Image (cartoon, coloured by chain):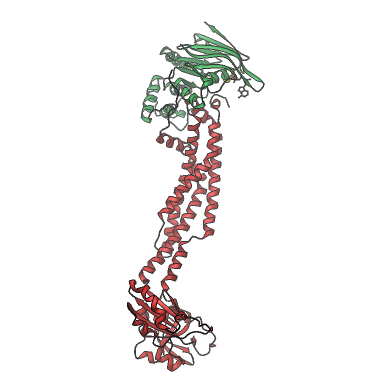
Amino acid sequence: MTALRPARLRPSDLARLGTSGLRARPMRAILAALGISIGIATMVTVVGISASSQEQLLRQLDALGTNLLRVQPGDSLFGDRVRLPKSAADMVRRIDGVTHASQTGETGVTVRRNDLIPSGVSLGITVQAASLDLLDTLDGRVRAGTWLNAATERQPVVVLGAVAAERLGLTGPDVQVWMGDRWFTVIGVLDRMPLAEEIERSALVGFPAAKDFLNHDGHPTTVYERSADEAVEGVRAVLARTVSPENPNEAKVSRPSDALKAKAAAAGAFTGLMLGLGAVALFVGAVGVANTMVVAVLERRREIGLRRSFGATRGQVRAQFLVEAVLLSAFGGGAGVLLGALATMGYARINGLPAVVPVWALGGALATTILIGALAGLYPALRAARVPPTVALSGQ
Amino acid sequence: MNILEIRGVSKSYGKVMALRDVDLVIRRGEMVSVVGPSGSGKSTLLQIAGTLDRPTAGTVRVAGHDVSRLSDSQLSALRARYIGFVFQQFHLSPGASALDNVAEGLLYTGLSRRQRRARAAAALERVGLGHRLGHRPHQLSGGQMQRVAVARAVAGEPPLLLADEPTGNLDSEAGAEVMALFRRLNAAGITIVIITHDTEVAMACPRRVRVRDGLVRSEIS
Ligand SMILES: Nc1ncnc2c1ncn2[C@@H]1O[C@H](COP(=O)(O)OP(=O)(O)OP(=O)(O)O)[C@@H](O)[C@H]1O
Ligand SMILES: [Mg+2]
C-alpha cells in the first residue's frame, strides 16, 4: 500500500485554472475589474503629471544654471532699510571667480500708459535703474527693440520686462509711457526671465537717466552676480562682507535657482486629493472584485464539487479562486496603468511638458493590484475551499 | 482483494438516518448495481463509498486505506488515484472540447498537460469517440456526452468506477450503449458500481445490491 500524497499543481496549470472563470465570462470580468482600472488610472495619472511637471522645471533649471546669486540690503537693527554702496557691482566683480556682476536700483516711481491714470496705480510694475551689463549677467534676451547702451542710458527711454509690457498692454517698442512726471519712450521689451522674475515685472532705465529724470539716489537695491559653478559657494561666503563691509549681516544673499528647485520639488509632490480619489476608487474596485468572486463561488459550487471528486484538495480549490481574484485585479491594474500613461501623455502634449511616468509608479501599481486581488479574493477562496465534495453528486 | 469494504456504516443527516449499520464488500473486478426506491439512501452510500463524505459511524476502506484515518488532502489523493465518478447530469464544461473535458479530470494527478491530453485522447478512443475530440458538449448527443463523462472517469485508469444513475437522462438506446461500454470496461478489469432505477441496467450486472430505508441487502444472480 503506497502513501497517499496529492500531486502539486504546476504553476502553468494554476494560471490556466485561474483564467478559466474569467474566460468563461469575459464581460463580467471586465466590469468587475473596472473599479480597479479607474483607481489605478487615477493614481498613475496623478503621479505621471506631477513627474512631468517636475521634469519640465528641472530641465529649465539645467538650462538656466544654478550659478547666479543675488544680494539685497536687509533691514538694519533699527528697522530701516540699509543702503548698498553705489559701486556695489564693481566691488563684487573683483571677487575671485566672479564672471559677471551688475546692479539695479528701485526708484519708487510708477509707470503708467498716460498721465491721466492716478499715480497710485502701479500694476505691480517696479521702475528700476539698471546697469548696462544686467542682461549679460542674467543671460536675458531682448524680445523686441533694443537694450540700453552708453547713449540711451542717459535719455528718458525705458526697456520693459516681459510681464511689465503685458500688464501695460504693450507688445513692442516706440510708444510712450508716463513715469514720474514725464514721458519716457519704450525702446525695448525683454524676454521671460525665470531666474529673475522681479526683472520681468520691471521698467528699466539707465542709472544716469534715473538720477536726472526720476531723482534716484544712485544706490543699488539688488546686485546680481554670476560665477563659475565651482566658485559659487566661495563667492557666497564673502558676498555680504564685500557689499556691506561694516554690517555684513544686513545684506541678504540668495540663490534664485533655489526657488525654482523648491518649485520643482513641490511639483513632484502629488496632490493629496487626487490620490485620495484614486484610493477610494481602488477600494470600491476591491469590493467589486470580492463581490464578483463571492458570486462566482456560489455559481460554481457544482464545478468545485466536481474538481474535488477529481481529487482536488481544499488548498488547490482555494488557490484556484485566489489566483482568479489576483488575475482579475491585475488585469484591471494593467488596463489602469495603460489608461493612466495615455492620460499623462495627453496632458503633457497639451501643456508642452515632457511626458514622464516613473517606473516605480508602474511597479507600484502592479504590486498594489496583486495585493488587492489577494485580499479581495481571500474570503471567496476560503468559502470555495469549504464547498463539500458531495455537491457534485447531489441533484440540485 | 477487496477494492471497497464498508463495515457497520451509518449516516445520519440530523434526525434522518440515511444509512443504518451497512456492511458491503466489493472485490476487484466486480460489476455491481445498486437499486432501491427514491430516498432509500443509494446516493448517500455512493458518496461514502467514494470518500466524498464521511460516515457517522463505521469504517470504510478503499483499496485497503481506512478512510477515517486519512486527512482531507490524503482523501483527495485517494480519489485522484483510485476512484472515477460518473454522474446522471454528465457535468461537462460547456465551453470546452471533449478532449479538454476529459483532460481536466486528470488535472490533479500530477501529469503534465501534454500527458493529460494524450491520455484523454486515448480514453475517448476507448469509449468510441476518437473522432469527436474537438466537439463541444452541445455538439454531442446525450449518449455521447455521457460517454465523454465515462472517458473522463476512466482516463486515469482508476480501479474503481462509481456511477450514480448514469443512464437516468438517456433514452433506452443511448442507455444501452453506455451499459455496453461499462461491460467492456469491466471486462478489461475495472470494478464498477452503478446506481440505477432501470431494471434492465440492474439485470445486466452480475451482482445487485438492494437498498431500502438505509438498509442494504446483496443478491447475486
Ligand atoms: N445533505 C442532506 N441533508 C439532509 N438530508 C439528506 C441529505 N442528503 C440526503 N438526505 C436524505 O437522506 C435520505 C437518502 O437520500 P439519498 O439521496 O441517498 O437517496 P437516493 O436513494 O439516492 O434517492 P434517489 O433515488 O431519489 O436519488 C433521504 O431521506 C434524503 O432526504
Ligand atoms: Mg440518488
**Residue B107 at what x, y percent from top left?**
43, 29
Q: Quadrant of residue A190?
A: bottom left
- Tell me if residue A213 comes above or below residue A1 in the rendering: below
Looking at the image, the residue that sits furthest to the bottom is: A212
Q: Quadrant of the N terminus of chain A?
A: top left
Q: Give the left or right position of residue B4, taking residue A158 as reference.
A: right
In the picture, the quarter occupied by the C terminus of chain A is top right
Q: Which of A235 and A301 lies nearest the eye of the viewer? A: A235
Q: Is residue A191 visible?
A: no
Which quadrant of the figure shows ligand 1?
top right
Judging by colour alone, the chain drawn in green in this rendered image is B
Q: Which chain is red?
A: A
Q: Quadrant of residue B24?
A: top right
Picture layout, residue B43 above or below residue A46: above
**Vertical position of residue A369 compared to residue B72: above or below:** below
Query: Where residue A263 appears, x then y in whole percent?
Result: 45, 67
At 55% from the left and 30% from the top, the residue drawn is: A387
Percent of width and height locating residue B142: 48, 23
Q: Nearer the viewer, residue A174 or A102?
A: A102
Q: Position of residue B172 (x, y in %)?
A: 51, 16
Query: In terms of depth relative to the viewer, which is nearer, A205 or A146?
Result: A205
